[in-house]
Amino acid sequence: MVHPLAPLAFAVALAGCAAPAVRQTTSPPPPSEPRTQAPRQGTAAPSTSAPAPPQRRTDVSLAFSSDAGWLDTRTTLSPQTYLDAGVFFTDDEVLADVGLLRVGRPSETSPLEIGAGVGVYGGLLDDPLDYVVAIPLKFYGSYTFQIGFPLRVVGNVAYAPDITTFVDGDSLLDARVSAELELTPQATVVVGYRYYEIGVDDRRDVELIDGLLFGVRLGF
């Protein structure tokens, strides 16, 4: 004889066995980890840093001849742009100049460098007293020989005709050629020749220097 509560006990037992299976099938799956893709071999990861600005350098040159001296500076604004400034003096004359020069090379490894630019000269000439202002064109060239210490042959020319020479002047010519021996990247010995002449309205051309020069250049 079946007990009257047997069907109820059987139903409770069946429900207990089925409950875990229901919970297992209805529970949400665990969240998956985000997958990161490894960079391909030989491929550099993209850089987010900004490119470094060009390094600015200033060279200071001090040179002299038997009766004249001058102090020049050259600041590197970019690998192809120089800002030049200087002052020239003798017993009777003082002139200052500033200029912008753009240079280039035929190739990245070429020892030849050439350039052109524009400048402004100004100063006074004594005996008698004359004032001169000029806007010359500037030309530059250099060739580097790698012979132990780098040896560089450099030429500079600045020329202003009558149309760009003002006040008491009517022309300007400043030409230099030099050999520069680089002892260290910050120290260079300079030996060369300079010819510097200014034409004046009411008298003959004034020759400021025509001779050898000796000097040093220091980099900062």
Image (cartoon, helix red, strand yellow):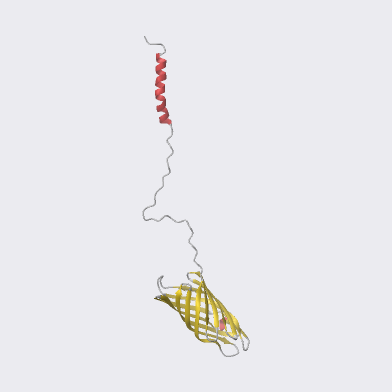
Quick one: which residue is furthest to the right in this view?
129
Residue drawn at (40%, 24%) of the image = 18
Question: Residue 145 location, x and y as percent?
Answer: 40, 77
Q: Nearer the viewer, residue 186 or 72?
A: 186
Residue drawn at (42%, 19%) of the image = 12
Would you identify the image quadrant in which residue 34 lies? top left
Classify 209 as above or below 12: below
Q: Nearer the viewer, residue 89 or 126?
A: 89
Quick one: which residue is furthest to the top in this view?
1
Question: Residue 217 location, x and y as percent?
Answer: 50, 76
Residue drawn at (41%, 22%) of the image = 16
Q: How many marks?
A: 0
- Specify whether 169 is left or right of 79: right
Q: Is residue 191 visible?
A: yes
Q: Is residue 133 visible?
A: no
Question: Residue 45 location, x and y as percent?
Answer: 42, 54
